[in-house]
Amino acid sequence: MRSVEKTGRTVEEAVDTALSEMGLTKDDVTIEVLLEPSRGFLGLLGGKDARVRVTPKRDRADMAKEFVAGLLERMGLEVAIEVRPRGEVLSLDIVGDDMGLLIGRHGETLRALEFLTNLASGRGGGEVKRVLVDVSGYRKRRERELEEIAKALARRVQRTGESATTHPLDARDRRVIHVALQDDSSVSTHSEGEEPFRRVVVSPKDKQESPVQEDTP
């Protein structure tokens, strides 16, 4: 769909006319004001209507896929991208051999890739509000690893009666720790510290001093 130019007594009226014709909402378009309205001499003569150009945004899902594919091509990597739309979330799983370069230490490179993908596609329209990027199912493996770490910490806390702390984790990984232990009646969890050194503290239930802080990814 191409841009549409419309006029109206006000900018809002011109925009509404264009949106009605296009069958879109303001969230789906970019709006450029070509001419502000003017009242003319004594509000009677020489007045001009507002004129706007309304352009549909590119679909965010397409923008995300193109960004990742283009980046991987420039890196000289031969991979496949598996696309799984789930309502407002789009999952892109990069599949190939020797993917350690894209994952990085504890997933640092992967997190950066996901951040850049969301940034590059952020002005896109459509249903997708967030893009998740994975590499050969790494995130599932990482989640299982974190769940084992959480259980090991809980066992240590039960054995020693003292709090135990994870190494610094990002918000998504901290969330996994919290969820893994939320039904454990013997321990409680909370996050402390400043990013990027924020950690999860696992404490005996009767010694918890800070409220549980549920991190969001």
Image: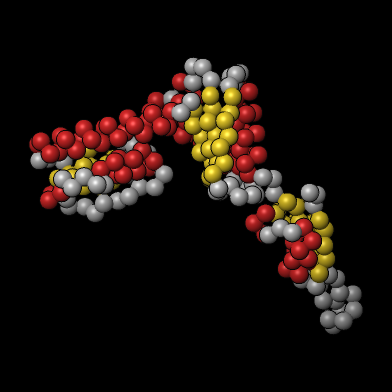
Q: Place residue 178 in its image quadrant.
A: top left
Question: Residue at image x 34%, y 32%?
Answer: 144
| Residue 42 position in % (x across, y down) | 85, 83
In which quadrant is the C terminus drawn? Answer: top left
Horizontal arrangement in the rendering, residue 207 relative to residue 193 (left or right):
left
146 lies above or below 122: above
| Residue 103 position in % (x across, y down) | 45, 26
- Residue furthest to the top in view is 98
Q: Give 61 or 108, whichever is nearer the viewer.
A: 61
49 lies above or below 161: below
Q: Give 40 or 22, whichever is nearer the viewer.
A: 22
Horizontal arrangement in the rendering, residue 141 relative to residue 154 (left or right):
right
Question: Residue at image x 16%, y 45%?
Answer: 186
- Residue furthest to the right in view is 45
Horizontal arrangement in the rendering, residue 80 relative to residue 163 (left or right):
right
- Residue furthest to the left in view is 160
Horizontal arrangement in the rendering, residue 13 relative to residue 150 (left or right):
right
Question: Residue at image x 21%, y 32%?
Answer: 152
| Residue 79 position in % (x across, y down) | 58, 22
Res 19 visible: yes
Res 35 visible: no
Question: Residue at image x 17%, y 52%?
Answer: 209
